[in-house]
Amino acid sequence: MFPGSNKKTRKKRRALRSGFTTGTAATAAAMAAKELLLTGYCPELVMVSLPDREKLNIPVNSCGLNRSGTSECTVIKDAGDDPDVTHKAVIGARVSTLPESEGIVIAAGEGVGRITKPGLELAPGEPAINQGPRRMIRENLTSISDKDIMGQGFLVEIFAPRGEILARRTLNKRLGILGGISILGTTGLVKPMSHAAYMATIDSSLAVAKACGSTSVVCTTGRRSERFAQGLFPELPTEAFVQIGDFFARSMQQAVRRGLGRIILVVFFGKSLKMAQGAEHTHAAKSALALEELGQLVKNKCKDRELAFRISSANTAREAFFLLQDRCPRIFMCIAGKMVDQARKFALGGAEIRGVLLDFEGRVIADTAAE
């Protein structure tokens, strides 16, 4: 086995600030809009009950009541210290009465996407407002007194003025969510650096790949490696390509759970080293490159002590790569094989796995299919 590093970083960090989801923002906007519709008063704050019954005060950004009897309020989404495309986005709700209904109908306005592919939590044709936020909206609106207009239902239209622009920075198009952002949130809160949202996106991508008929999935670690992978496998549909980021182990596990029997890993050299070491998560903060161990591998496979020493002393994977390129190129196939071995271990033997290593220009330097 290609061993990993046990070095730990001990940097002191300030406490990271939590935020709230787009689902919570939409709920708060809907609550404010319903209160405005019933009372003519625009609240400065609304208290949202989250799924775990925790209460959260959300500031209201704007309110308006038009002559047709529709109220409109907005909230500014606050993701805390979590990196989030929708941080500081305006999320709004329009609320009007439905005289012939006693329920709450939830619809998507401008900037909120619509589902066009199977495999997601909701069926094609539905607004991209997940079940969690829908329940939260209904439960919180029901808690607001409507005694003056009993027997009437409400139409709640969720909108996001810049949603279509923001969606370009997400994987929504790949998942078949068109026209804007998704309204998401299981707990109602965003835990900084929890990565839960990213993992949920990976799982959704795998589900869409399966639902669209793919038996193979090409896993890359980001947009650049995916672009090269699409050039290598032009016969595969767009849905078959899934960006797994740093989530090596969990992505292999989820792919097998989704019934995807063939996994192709297409990664750059630096990430392949970490995967070959068995790192479950390949972020720099979660694993080390362990170039000393790579140097030992070079010593054993290439019988070049001087090169092995230089690899062990290298500062970066890039430096090591260029040292190896001419003097020990067969090491790349060895690393690809070890990466595949680790992937099989995480997948519990439930999938056929192929490994493709790329150099820093996107050229193939090793492919386990050639073994």
Image (cartoon, rainbow, N blue to C red):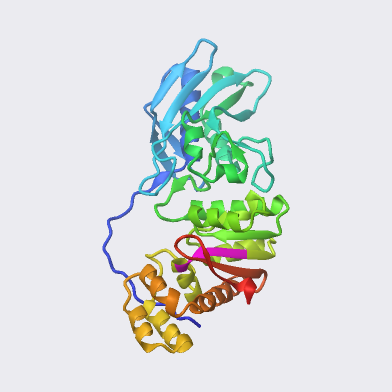
Question: Is 259 or 48 nearer to us in this picture?
Answer: 259
* Relative side of 174 to 54, left or right: right
Where in the figure is residue 255, as x and y percent of width and height? Answer: 63, 62
Where in the figure is residue 15, as x and y percent of width and height? Answer: 30, 55
Question: What residue lies at 63% left-to-right and 57% top-to-bottom?
Answer: 233
Is residue 76 found inside the magenta-colored segment of the image? no
Can the viewer see residue 348? no
Is 161 placed above or below 204 here?
above
What residue span does the magenta drawing correspond to? 264-269
Q: Quadrant of the C terminus?
A: bottom right
Where in the figure is residue 203, as x and y percent of width and height? Answer: 59, 55
Question: Is 44 or 367 nearer to us in this picture?
Answer: 367
Question: What residue lies at 50% left-to-right and 48% top-to-bottom?
Answer: 187
Question: What residue lies at 39% left-to-right and 52% top-to-bottom?
Answer: 192
Can the viewer see residue 242? yes
Question: Is 38 or 328 nearer to us in this picture?
Answer: 328
* Relative side of 300 to 16, left or right: right
